[in-house]
């Protein structure tokens, strides 16, 4: 095994065929990162070995990849492999102490909740969005936790077909479609179609 190579976000994205945003997201999700001085400036870097292992694990858990593997196995006459789709889990409890030894600040549980979306521009379809979010309290959308659904554009026909298959089995697909028709979202994959299909309506 050769020496460890340290890659910037841009180099890492090219190395595994993902976007820089995906590499940043993996870092926030726990992928070990380091620092390196490049042209006199500190930059975040990741080792090629860690990046490859993280990328393989992400692909293994990706429903899109699993659907592709199932399609290949069907074409070869082999039995289907079981899907390992992500499920929404309860939020983890907040730690009582920080790694530095300081005590975490107390949280007022009776204080009004701050809506992080309040600063965003108003949506064209607030009623439809409220309906979707209310339904998500009881039913998990099939796209939950799948990064591929939030892309800006979709040019790969095979990937679009896989995402559409996932949407077809979603309990919220009709509510999602109603929202997308009214909102005409700027990005993402909604109820079996990319956002561009709704903007053309």
Image (cartoon, grey):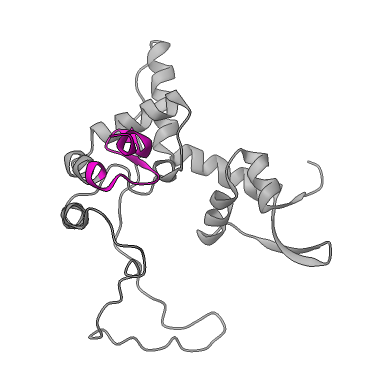
| Residue 31 image point, x, y percent | 57, 56
Vertically, is 117 above or below 7?
below
**Magenta residues (range):** 180-201
Left or right: 168 in relation to 30? left
| Residue that sits furthest to the front in the current view | 201
**Residue at image point 37% right, 26% down:** 161
Left or right: 124 in relation to 187? left
Vertically, is 7 above or below 100?
above
The quarter of the picture where residue 39 lies is bottom right
| Residue 15 image point, x, y percent | 67, 40
Viewer-side residue, 178 vs 81: 178
Q: In the image, is residue 163 part of the stretch drawn in magenta?
A: no
| Residue 75 image point, x, y percent | 40, 12
Vertically, is 151 above or below 90?
above
| Residue 153 image point, x, y percent | 46, 38
Please state, as top left, top right, bottom left or bottom right, where the C terminus lies in the image.
Answer: top left
Left or right: 54 in relation to 36? left
Please state, as top left, top right, bottom left or bottom right, where the N terminus lies in the image.
Answer: top right
Left or right: 136 in relation to 151? left
**Residue at image point 17% right, 39% down:** 174
Q: In the image, is residue 200 part of the stretch drawn in magenta?
A: yes
């Amino acid at each position: 095994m050769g020496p460890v190579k340290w890659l910037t976000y841009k180099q890492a994205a090219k190395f595994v065929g993902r976007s820089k945003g995906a590499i940043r997201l993996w870092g926030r999700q726990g992928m070990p990162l380091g620092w390196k001085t490049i042209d006199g400036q500190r930059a975040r870097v990741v080792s090629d070995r860690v990046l490859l292992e993280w990328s393989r694990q992400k692909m293994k858990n990706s429903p899109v990849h699993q659907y592709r593997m199932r399609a290949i196995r069907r074409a070869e006459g082999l039995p289907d492999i079981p899907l390992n789709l992500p499920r929404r889990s309860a939020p983890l409890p907040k730690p009582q102490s920080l790694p530095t030894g300081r005590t975490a600040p107390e949280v007022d549980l009776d204080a009004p909740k701050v809506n992080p979306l309040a600063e965003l521009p108003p949506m064209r379809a607030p009623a439809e969005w409220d309906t979707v979010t209310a339904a998500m309290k009881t039913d998990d959308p099939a796209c939950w936790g799948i990064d591929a659904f939030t892309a800006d554009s979709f040019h790969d026909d095979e990937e679009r077909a896989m995402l559409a298959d996932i949407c077809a089995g979603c309990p919220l697909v009709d509510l999602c479609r109603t929202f997308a028709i009214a909102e005409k979202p700027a990005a993402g994959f909604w109820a079996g179609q990319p956002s561009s299909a709704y903007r053309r309506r």
